[in-house]
Amino acid sequence: MRYDTIIIGGGLAGLVSGIELARSGSRVAIISSGKSALHFCSGSFEFWSEGMAAVGSIAEHNPDHPYSKIDPKKIARYTEQTKDIFARAGMPLVGSAEANHLRLTPLGALKPAWLTMDEYVTFEAVGVSEYRSVVIVAIEGYLDFYPEFIAKGLEQMGLECHIREISLAEFNRLRQSATEMRAVNLSRTLKGSPLREFAQRVKALVEDEDLVLLPAIFGLGEERGLQIVEEIVGRKVKVAATVSASASGVRMQKRLTDAFQSLGGVFIGGDRVVGCTIDESRIVSLNTANHEEEEFVAENYILATGSFFGRGIVATPEEVYEPILGLDVVPQMARKEWYADDILDAQPFQKFGVATDSELHPMIDGRVVENLYAVGSILSGADAVKEGCGAGVVIATALMVAENILAYKHK
Amino acid sequence: MKKQESRNISAGNFEQCTKCTICTVYCPMLEVNPFYPGPKQAGADGERYRLKEPKYYDEALRYCLNCKRCEVSCPSGVRIGDIIALARAKNSRGVPKLRDVLFANTDLVGSVATRVAPMLNRALESKPIRGAMDTLLAIDHRRILPRYAEEKFTTWFAKNALAEQSKYGRSVTYFHGCYANYNDPQLGKDLVKVLNAVGFGVRLMEGERCCGMTKIASGMLSQATADAKRNLAEIRREVGEGRRVIATSSSCAFALRDEYEHILGLDNHDVRSSISLATRFIYRQMERGNIKLAFRKDFKMRVAYHFACHIEKLGWSIYSTSLLRMIEGLELLLLPSQCCGMAGTYGLKRENYNYSQAIGESLFAHIESLGVDCVATDCETCKGQIEMSTSVKVLHPINILAEAIDVEATRKLNDLK
Ligand SMILES: Cc1cc2nc3c(=O)[nH]c(=O)nc-3n(C[C@H](O)[C@H](O)[C@H](O)COP(=O)(O)OP(=O)(O)OC[C@H]3O[C@@H](n4cnc5c(N)ncnc54)[C@H](O)[C@@H]3O)c2cc1C
Ligand code: SF4
Ligand code: SF4
């Protein structure tokens, strides 16, 4: 099978670069084993938790950070491009390249974010709220949403909070299997008449509050679920993040995959790239577990297989390695240095990943693989947790590589 | 350069589970049935308990469709469906019902049924008989059962095709399976038509048995193993003589390649990569320039492709869709990849009927909304389910290919007289 570009890994990194390339008319295939970290998306993407103003000087203080390879002048454009991709896929985002906004974590903390799905409640800054009072709606038997914690967070913002609970016959059916009362299952139930019934019950709870806050359980059973609820309730309705697999994340995976396919991209799911042929410093072809001797051939290849979670890099008791091509992984250090003792401290293993040159070409024994690029959380040098840069690194590197591939093509 | 991945590999990779819950998002049964514990709990989580003490086996595991969509979604390579299927076969205390034995023995029942096909088909359509089957056999009276053919594919082949197959320079072996043989011989005939047109002779294996998928799904592993051993011996002979073995049914191909090893514990590594799917075989021959196809100028069709569960697990839908895309005059739409609810013989059983239809509901609505001439799929039981539940006809990609090609022009292109 022949393509212009083959992308290994169909998480956020693979899909964003795939969509950009397919949109420009390239023949692109994504090969992906299993589903990705997107399923746990909080509804928000982070770029740099210290603030967007600091983005220009990140490289200075962190020469090994993936951001040091990205031109800071391009970030405003990448931000608009990201919003455009998500809007076209039916999931509009709010946020800007100038300043972070605040998002609400499932535990009620207010954290800086770059872009957030517009269904989620966000604030411009601490103490700046367009709402006066809020009713936080809990669902009987649903344990992945913590109204009390969320109320504490919102009280800091000066909001008057009321917690009220509703139940729904359709949800009680799910409760028969205690572990399955999950955002994804609730969200699938909320369509047609149960959705309307749900909205009516919410409406009955609202007094004079100007905001209704629900757990993020919309969009799977009925794409327009939250809008329908808002129309019936007749008040501003927003959602807050839940824990465990998120309905928004599942929807993102699905909508981005659909968007990629509708641009003519080929998505080969449930398959694993297991080997490749390299000639000098170029990849000639890839092989996958399902397709056996069939060769996947392209001009360019993008490695977007993720970090430890996606198995883009793998740890054994002795070492950390990249399993497909045996790419150079940095930093190499003794196992006892991988972790900091206090789990709240920065963990060195978070920065593990493949080494790349300034154009994001990875290397084998110090030698660059010319037609291969690495994008996303497989890159070394970023600590997504401590620096709050997870999706920022993923999206910016994915867009940069797509842009470079297209630029070479036009030359 | 490539290093050995991970040690501690156990049956089904169950210790690789990171408890991420992604599999639970893609399980069609969990979506409609609150009594089903779901792939995470029934699979890796439950296995820990069952290894400790078999009494932790939960009879609700019987709801599993064996669709393997959980496995396709798992980022950690846990063979969840296999773990469940094996736990079921090992622990289930229920004695198989007469009905389950009948459903599992598609080959035996098929060979009897084709002999009395006209009468049987009429009977299966009659209300009182369906009512009686519901009462006596727990086969849902609302279910439309597959019709049986009056002449088996193998009989037709022996009479009409066998003699000329040796005229072709190249040959390939066809594993027709029960469905093409007893229910839909046209599928086999169409495959012969296409392969002959591009210069391949078709061989059948005299000792072919049922692939065993229905027996595996009903936990009848010893019968499945007997069939499987016979099939492997037959396949080994064909492969030894340099032929590939191709199936039209994605579930047959999947059983021969993967279930034999993972569920029945048979070693098939020597022939596994020679077992393929008809669409994959044809596509790969085309890609290498070994064969060419010419299409009828007047052919027009708007088709929606349905991704059957086991072709998703094989990862081979790309061959069927690529082949359909090559057909001039064919407009291809892709349906969202989801289970239709049938899962082999699962949906035939009365106790599963409502779950089965609930799983497929959104797919059926989607199909109706598209205004297509037909749905294409590589799975025979999806065909039955979609035809029963929508107003749209379902064809195998090979049926469509056979209709679309210009046989004379194709033969010429391939230098045949
Ligand atoms: C649980 C979790 C939650 C997170 N939440 C957030 C958040 O809310 N906001 C934020 O900004 N950041 C978040 N992050 C940071 C996260 O790293 C990024 O947001 C992003 O989703 C990572 O995308 P990726 O495409 O690089 O990797 P992944 O999402 O891991 O995708 C990699 C894909 O490659 C596939 N793959 C791996 N090996 C192969 C192979 N050999 N062949 C084929 N395919 C292969 C995997 O199966 C997987 O589908 C989170 C991270 C995790 C782990
Ligand atoms: S998807 Fe795989 S790793 Fe995740 S819970 Fe299911 S079996 Fe475990
Ligand atoms: S095989 Fe299918 S029905 Fe069974 S647990 Fe997996 S996804 Fe669910």
Image (cartoon, coloured by chain):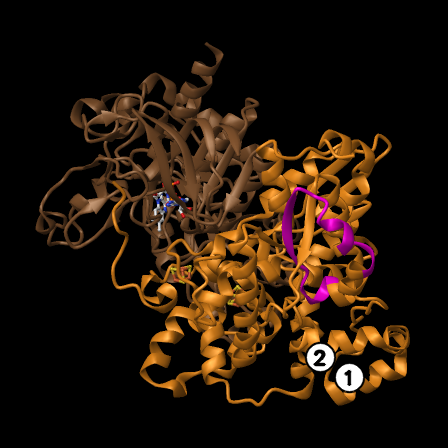
The answer to which of B314 and A250 lies nearer the viewer is B314
Q: Nearer the viewer, residue B352 or B188?
A: B188
Of all chains in the rendering, the one displayed in orange is B
Q: Colour of chain A?
A: brown
- Helix, strand or loop for disc 2: helix
Position in image of residue A108 (x %, y %): 35, 53
Frontmost residue, B381 versus B357: B381
> B46 or A96: which is nearer to us?
B46
Residue B56 position (above or below residue A142): below
Chain letter for mark 1, please: B
Percent from the top left, x then y, of residue A311? 33, 48
Identify which residue is drawn at 78% across, 78% down. Answer: B112
Query: Do labels 2 and 1 touch, CB within 8 Å?
Result: yes
Question: Which image quadrant for residue A25?
Answer: top right
Whichever of labels 2 and 1 marks the residue nearer the N terminus, that label is: 1
Q: State the quadrant of the N terminus of chain B.
A: top left
Q: Which residues are magenta?
A: B159-180
Task: Report whether residue A113 is seen.
Answer: no
| Residue assigned mark 2 | B350
Q: Which residue is mark 1?
A: B134
